[in-house]
Image (spheres, helix red, strand yellow):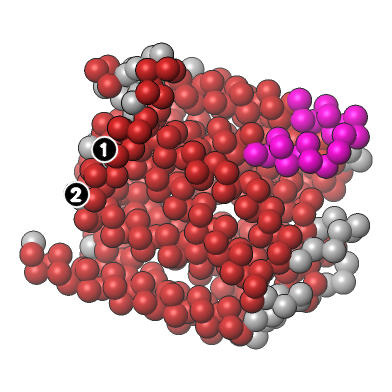
Amino acid sequence: MSAVRDLRVLLRLTNFRRLLAVRLLSQSADGVYQVALATYVVFSPEKQTSPAAIASAMAVLLLPYSLVGPFAGVLLDRWRRRQIFLYGNLLRALLAGVTAVLILASVPDWIFFASALSVTAVNRFVLAGLSAALPRVVDQERLVTANALSPTAGTLAATAGGGLAFAVRLISEDSDAAVVTLGAVLYLCSALASLRMDKQLLGPDPEQIQPRLGAALASTARGLRAGLRHLVERPAAARVLTAMTLMRFNYGALTVMVLMLCRYAWYENEQDGLALLGVAVGISGAGFFAAAVLTPWAVHRLGRVGWMAICSGAAALLVPALGLSFTPGPTLAAAFILGFITQGSKITTDTVVQTSVDDAYRGRVFSLYDVLFNVAFVGAAGVAALILPPDGRSLQLLVLVALIYGATAITLARWNRVDTRSA
């Protein structure tokens, strides 16, 4: 298969491997933090968790930095991206280490959320920078395969980091501090891994760099306007971003549903519910991996927009069919399908954006992409909080998700026919 050949070529590219190492270490640390938040908010025995509490936690972590995300994108197009990976991960390691010490000192709970906010702020730079830098180490011919491997491998690394966090919680007495310390170590390793790449390698081009913070911030407003105008002028990128945002909304709503089902509907014991959530995360990760393997082949035969339409249409049929029983077995099968569909669509979206957007604007557009992801996820959690009953069983939410998937699939199919005729 050509995808297998491309994968072998990619793994022989030294700079691609080095950028991939930075991603794997950074996102594994992100997975540690995500599990720390989920277990703190949802599975603490002393807390009576509700969908509204989950939505509030997501809003606290994601919305404030969604507002500054586009500004991060402008800076990504003004600063050396390798330096962002180095200093961003060093800062996150420091913040996590300090927080672990404060937790051991029994400081108030808000310290935990303040730390998570700080880490999320820096995360806006790192994740958008990783996507923006990928075309600098891979030729365009193999970009679909690179997008299948790199972000999916990062997602799997986050899943593995979550698994490590679960294990640490089971064996450590001071579990919260130990989990945060694990995240700090992984962030430090990611920072050190970035030193293996040259400062100039990942862009932007030298004439775009503004090393002084004041000069970079002064150009932010102009840069944002230029980035949005650049995106509007590239309808292919704007279309897939719109579709991916709707699919992310569905993913967020179903995530809250599964959290509540694990917490209240299926088990009375918090530890049993937490264990099942870990299984669901692992199965979803297997769906991510399957998407990474099959998406390059599917895109080659169906086209990028055509493959996204197939993914969304399949979700419209399969997710409610499996979820309506509200029992663990079918719901875990739906987790695999949802992971496959979401990751397959994201791989395709990343590739369309990378190939449609000029390098000078790529950081801004990927930061906007990141903002849309976060706002959709938080918005979905808010909608789920209004619809879901305390035990998480909601026919109305499943119907809403199915309708959104179906409408997205129909729209993508129309865009694909138009693009095919004009080609």
Q: What residue does disc 2 label?
A: 233
Where residue 296 appears, as percent x and y from the top left, is 31, 56
Q: Are marks 2 and 1 in contact (CB under 8 Å)?
A: no
Instruction: Provide the major secondary structure of the magenta segment.
Output: helix
For numbered disc 1, what is the local secondary structure?
A: helix
Q: Examine the image and state in which quarter residue 142 appears.
A: top left
Residue 304 sits above or below residue 120 on the image: below
Q: Residues within 10 Å of mark 2 (few under 14, many from 20)?
A: few
Where residue 363 appears, as percent x and y from the top left, is 36, 35
Where residue 98 appears, as percent x and y from the top left, is 76, 25
Give the left or right position of residue 63, taking residue 53 as reference: left
Which numbered tag is attached to residue 226? 1
Among the two numbered marks 2 and 1 on one chain, the one whose residue lies closer to the N terminus: 1
Where residue 325 appears, as percent x and y from the top left, is 65, 85
Amino acid of disc 1:
Ala
Residue 314 sits above or below residue 16 on the image: below
Nearest to viewer (mark 2 / mark 1): 1
* Residue in the picture at 45% in, 58% down: 343
**Of 405 and 396, the residue lying toward us:** 396
Give the left or right position of residue 288, taking residue 78 as reference: right
